[in-house]
Image (tube, helix red, strand yellow):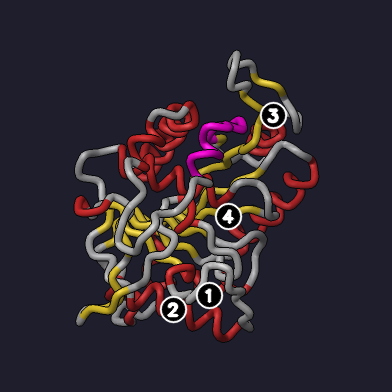
Amino acid sequence: MADQSSPVARRLQTVKNIIIVLSGKGGVGKSSVSTQLALNLHASSPTAKVGILDVDLTGPSIPRMLGLDGHGVHQSSSGWVPVYADGPEARLACMSVGFLLKNKGDSVVWRGPKKNGMIRQFLSDVRWGELDYLVIDTPPGTSDEHLSLLEHMAPVHSRLSAVIVTTPQAVALMDAMKCLSFTRAVNLPILGLIENMSGYVCPCCGEISNVFSTGGGEEMARREELRFLGSLPVDTELVTLLDAAEPEKEGSVREGILQQYSSTSSAKLFKKIVERMVEQLG
C-alpha cells in the first residue's frame, strides 16, 4: 500500500488533479501543449489555481514559453517557492530545473539517480499550496523521469491522469502507441489524445494547409478507444508569443502573457479541449 505519510504525499495532499503530458517522440510540440493547457486551466475560472512542473530536465523550455527565463528559485521555511507567471495574482505557479541553472545555456548532464533525486525534490520540497490542477511536462518517450514520477506519486495515484500529444505523421503515431502501451502497463488513466501541428493556418487569409497530413491522431484514438480531445494547427502567432524574448530582469513577468495568449486562434481551439478534459475530471 502506498505510504500516505511520505513527503510527496504530504506536499501534494492539497492538489486536486495531476495531469501528466506525454509524447512518444520529440518535436511534436508537447511543451507548447503543456503551456497552453496550464494557461487555459488558469483562464477556466477566476479562482482556478494551477501549477506547471517541468521535468524535462535536459531540455527545460517551460520558463521561456511563460516569459520567466532568468528567474531564480527562492527558499522559504516551508520549501522552495515556485515562480508565478501571473505575478501578484499568484494563481499560475511554475517550477523547472531551468530556474536552477546559473546560465540558461548550461547543459544538464545527469545520470538516472540524480534525475530521480531532482524529481523527488520537485514533488516534495516545492511549496505548491492548494492547486486545482498540476500540469507536468515530461521528456519525450518513456524513460527514467516517467518511472520516477510514477514511483514518487504512488500515494496520489487516484488523482493522476495523462494526455498524449502526437502529430499526424505515421512515425509520430507509432511512438504515440508506445506511450499508450506505457500508460496501460502502469495503470495510468488517459484523458485523451491531442493531434498537434494538424495543418498550417495562413496568417493572411486563414486558410489551413495540411503540411503533415491530418486525421491520424483521431483515427488512432478511435481505433484504441481513446477520447480524441482535438487537433491544433500550426499557429504562427502562438509560435511568436511563446518564443518571445524573456524579461530583462529577475522578478519581472512578461507583460500580459495571459492576455496576449487569450487573443490567439490557438487559445480558442484549446479552450474546447480543456472543457472536454475538465468534464472528464469532474
Q: Which residue is label 1 attached to? A: 148
The quadrant in which the N terminus is found is bottom left
Is disc 1 surrounded by few (<14), some (14 to 19) or many (20+) residues within 10 Å?
Answer: some
Q: Give amino acid for label 2.
A: Arg
Q: Which residue is label 3 attached to? A: 215
Q: CA distance from mark 1 to mark 3?
A: 33 Å
Residue at x 73% of width, y 44% of height:
173
Q: Which residue is label 4 attached to? A: 22
Farthest residue in the right direction?
A: 171
Q: Is residue 253 above or below residue 123?
A: above
Q: Is residue 231 magenta?
A: yes
Q: Which residue is label 2 attached to? A: 120
Q: Secondary structure at mark 2?
A: helix
Q: CA distance from mark 3 to mark 4?
A: 19 Å
Q: Give amino acid for label 1.
A: Ser
Q: Secondary structure at mark 4?
A: strand
The x and y percentages for residue 250 are 34, 64
Magenta stretch bounds:
229-242
Among numbered discs 1 and 2, the one appearing first in the sequence: 2
Residue at x 31% of width, y 53% of height:
92
Q: Secondary structure at mark 3?
A: loop
Among numbered discs 4 and 2, the one appearing first in the sequence: 4
